Image (cartoon, helix red, strand yellow):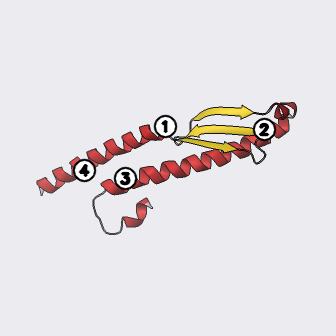
Amino acid sequence: MFGDLMGMMGKLKETQEKVEATKKRLDTVLIDEASTDGLLKITLTANREIKSIEIEESLLEDKEQLEDYLVLTLNKAIAKATDINETELAAVAKEGMPNIPGLDGMFK
């Protein structure tokens, strides 16, 4: 009984270390997103940290338009980053979980 518990605890610790390593790796995964016309370009990590924003000069003339572009393009970039982040972390977590019936759908 204790052997199983110790083995499970070891596996959970190993999984936690893999999750932390995956989070660090996701800092290096870059997502590039641009407005449909290419006037605004945003780069962020899969951990949703903004790395750069490039704005065409013409957008600086219209504050409201620039704000709209920022909102739309940032939301698209963040959605992509979130999808990558959640998929990667769920895969690592699922890999390290003990095989308990009924928990299969929890990490999809």
- Distance between mark 2 and mark 3 Cα atoms: 38 Å
CA distance for labels 3 and 1: 20 Å
Callout 4: helix, strand or loop?
Answer: helix
The three-letter amino acid code for the residue at tag 2 is Glu
Q: Give the residue displayed 35% in from the left and 69% down from the top.
A: 102
Dot 1 corresponds to which residue?
A: 28
Determine whether label 2 and label 4 are within 8 Å by CB: no
Q: Amino acid at mark 3?
A: Ala
Q: Is residue 40 left or right of residue 8?
A: right
CA separation in Å, label 4 and label 3: 11 Å
Q: Look at the numbered discs 4 and 1 and tell me whether their residues touch, using CB distance below 8 Å.
A: no
Q: Quadrant of the C terminus?
A: bottom left
The kind of residue on which mark 4 rests is: Lys
Give the residue at x 48% y 37%. 27
Residue designated by label 2: 67
Mark 4 → mark 1, Cα distance in angstroms: 26 Å
Lateral position of residue 5 relative to residue 108, left or right: left
Q: Quadrant of residue 68?
A: top right
Q: Amino acid at mark 1?
A: Thr
